[in-house]
Image: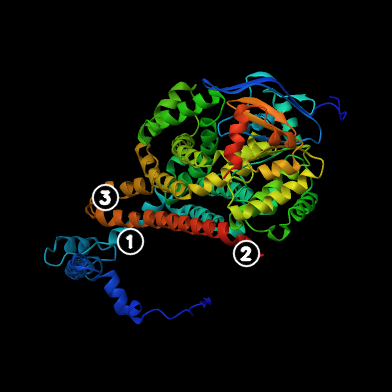
């Protein structure tokens, strides 16, 4: 009996696995429990969506007509949103107490930072000039905001506010926190007891207190320990507080990545004669950071939203500026909800962009690990 | 710092090592001549890996003296650095750097430790890859290669710093059976080049054909050492006979 090996040719998949009906069956009605859930959710959407649309669009007031706003807000039969509050107050919400006539300066400064952020996300911009470009961008930002040169009127940092302040605190905070976090993580794993103790002390101390108390200390307590007239700017102190706070959390994330690296990697590097810093820089960190991209981005997103807490020490970033815009204005004060939705959308856009970028980076790293060599 | 051929290149002198309470190496006396090829064998947990890992200070000994190419190993970073430049190492688990291409794995140490210009390091790397017959994979990443290919790359990487001593820690133990031969072939070729080799392995055929001396260890001690012919034909010690009967009769 001679057995001949014959390859079975590939056949097309059965038709019932493809097409819209198959999709509906497998995704919406795979069994009776999911089917019931699908029907219930569809009914809820059908019931509430028209009401939501009526409120948000069809009955809403978009002009800054205060009387009309009050009318739709009190119309129980046909309630509507008052987007007029944004039309009326958006400049104060976005730019805080910055002098009204010079609002082009914070606008330009914000655009500059956003532009730099977008550019920095693109691999083709990951060149040596990126770091100097950021330094130049921050310098330009401070010049625009602070003024006092080139015919720009001087604006003290206490009057900076709104979106540019949020962007500045988030980007500068994250940018400064990252290297500190890496050093603290390495220090925590260091064989040197003094270094290790110092890093553990810093991380556990900062993680053990709420950000608000760090900000209070930076803002009110810290100046008490310095001779009068020597106190650094409140913005600088708050920035330092945010940076140290974010760095402590980030350090633990980086440590997690470092500890996931097989000890064989470090031994191989040692056996090749690489020193401690070369091993960390070339072998440990590149692999560790890849492992923890989602957690790093999680930290960044937290820091971005945590900036809203600086309002407790009288820095009016986006959230603070919103309070500033409405608190003293009895006409528009009732329409907090719509105004909060407005800044919620701004925060959400930033966070969602970061989250999507993180997913893209993860996919890119996964692909480059598998196929980079095949391109050759 | 004599460099004469008759002085041993590695000299263990009453070396002792403990892991906590566990006495891992006991009064090790071993002297390795330049160009000598030594195979270390013994049951698992006998200290053979610990022994060769002491040579490049991946493990530190607590008592005794260990001199490698004229440098006494101690926690002095200068001594460790000098010794590591003379000693190449191949691991059981390959330990290639997965985030670097094959070529980058090979050029890393020459450029950052040996301060070689990149193009020179590349030339040297390609020559070594040629030698282990894997030059066509230079731009792939380690995880795209088979186990045997990865281990050959690891050997090439260790050779890129032109070491005087090669340590091989069970280089074929993590390989699928059909890949063992391609790695052994490379090791046999390496053994013919006059480099000093210290190899922990269970491949007794390989030991018989290339080793100048076989060192048998048990419970942290060197039980006996002899030329392969004598070692296999007339093992002097009961423990050696027991070990050989287990490893050869299956």
Seen in the image, is B58 located left or right of residue A350? right
Q: Please tell me in which quadrant of the rendered image residue B61 appears.
A: top right
Chain under callout 3: A
| Cα distance in 3D space between marks 3 and 1 | 15 Å
Find residue A351 and report its image quarter: bottom left
Say which residue label 1 marks: A87
Which one is in front, B246 or B51?
B246
Question: In the rendered image, which residue does mark 2 sit on?
Answer: A374
Indicate the quadrant where residue B159 lies. Answer: top right
Question: Coloured how?
Answer: rainbow
Pointer 3: residues within 10 angstroms few (<14), some, or many (20+)? few
Q: Point out residue A137 in the picture as x, y percentages from the top left corner.
A: 58, 50
Q: Earlier in the sequence, mark 2 or mark 3?
A: 3
Q: Position of residue B222 (x, y in %)?
A: 65, 26
In the image, residue B201 sits, relative to residue A208, either above or below, namely: below
The x, y position of residue A229, in whole percent, is 50, 26
């Amino acid at each position: 009996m001679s057995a001949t090996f014959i390859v079975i040719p590939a056949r097309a998949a059965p038709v019932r696995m493809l097409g819209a009906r198959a999709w509906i069956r497998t995704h919406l009605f795979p069994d009776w429990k999911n089917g019931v859930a699908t029907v219930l959710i569809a009914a809820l959407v059908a019931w509430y969506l028209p009401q939501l649309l009526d409120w948000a669009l069809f009955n809403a007031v978009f002009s800054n007509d205060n009387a009309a706003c009050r009318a739709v807000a009190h119309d129980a039969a046909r309630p509507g949103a008052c987007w007029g509050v944004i039309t009326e107050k958006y400049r104060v919400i976005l730019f805080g107490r910055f002098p009204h006539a010079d609002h082009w300066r914070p606008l330009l400064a914000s655009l500059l930072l956003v532009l730099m952020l977008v550019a920095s996300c693109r691999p083709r911009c990951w060149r040596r000039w990126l770091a100097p470009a950021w330094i130049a961008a921050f310098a330009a930002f401070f010049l625009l905001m602070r003024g006092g040169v080139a015919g720009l009127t001087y604006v003290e940092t206490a009057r900076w506010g709104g979106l540019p302040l949020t962007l500045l605190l988030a980007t500068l905070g994250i940018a400064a926190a990252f290297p500190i976090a890496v050093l603290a993580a390495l220090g925590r794993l260091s064989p040197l007891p003094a270094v290790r103790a110092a890093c553990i002390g810093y991380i556990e101390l900062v993680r053990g207190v709420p950000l608000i108390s760090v900000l209070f200390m930076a803002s009110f307590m810290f100046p008490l320990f310095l001779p009068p007239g020597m106190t650094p700017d409140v913005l600088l102190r708050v920035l330092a507080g945010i940076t140290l706070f974010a760095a402590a959390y980030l350090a633990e994330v980086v440590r997690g990545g470092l500890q996931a690296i097989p000890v064989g990697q470090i031994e191989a590097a040692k056996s090749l004669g690489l020193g401690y810093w070369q091993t960390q820089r070339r072998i440990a960190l590149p692999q560790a950071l890849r492992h923890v991209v989602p957690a790093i981005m999680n930290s960044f997103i937290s820091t971005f939203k945590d900036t809203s807490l600086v309002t407790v020490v009288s820095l009016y970033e986006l959230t603070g500026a919103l309070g500033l815009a409405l608190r003293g204005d009895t006409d528009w004060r009732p329409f907090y909800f719509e105004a909060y939705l407005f800044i919620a959308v701004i925060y959400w856009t930033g966070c969602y962009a970061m989250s999507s970028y993180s997913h893209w980076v993860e996919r890119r790293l996964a692909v480059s690990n598998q196929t980079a060599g095949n391109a050759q | 710092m004599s460099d004469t051929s008759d002085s041993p290149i590695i000299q263990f002198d009453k070396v002792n090592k403990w892991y906590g309470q566990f006495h891992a190496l006991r009064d090790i006396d071993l002297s390795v001549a330049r160009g000598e090829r030594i195979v270390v064998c013994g049951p698992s947990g006998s200290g053979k890996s610990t022994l060769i890992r002491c040579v490049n200070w991946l493990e530190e000994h607590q008592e005794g003296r260990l001199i490698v190419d004229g440098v006494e190993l101690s926690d002095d970073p200068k001594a460790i650095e000098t010794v590591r430049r003379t000693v190449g190492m191949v691991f059981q688990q390959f330990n290639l750097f997965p985030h670097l291409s094959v070529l980058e794995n090979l050029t890393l140490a020459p450029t950052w430790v040996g301060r070689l210009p990149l193009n020179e390091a590349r030339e040297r790397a390609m020559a070594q890859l040629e030698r282990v017959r894997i030059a066509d994979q230079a731009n792939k990443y380690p995880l795209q290669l088979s186990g045997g290919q990865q281990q050959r790359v690891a050997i090439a990487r260790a050779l890129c710093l032109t070491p005087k001593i090669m340590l091989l820690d069970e280089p074929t133990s993590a390989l699928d059976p059909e890949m063992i031969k391609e790695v052994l072939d490379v090791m046999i070729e390496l053994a013919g080049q006059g480099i000093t080799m210290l190899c922990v392995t269970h491949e007794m055929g390989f030991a018989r054909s290339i080793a100048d001396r076989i060192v048998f260890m048990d419970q942290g001690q060197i039980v006996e050492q002899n030329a392969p012919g004598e070692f296999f034909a007339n093992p002097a010690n009961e423990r050696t006979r027991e070990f050989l009967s287990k490893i050869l009769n299956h």
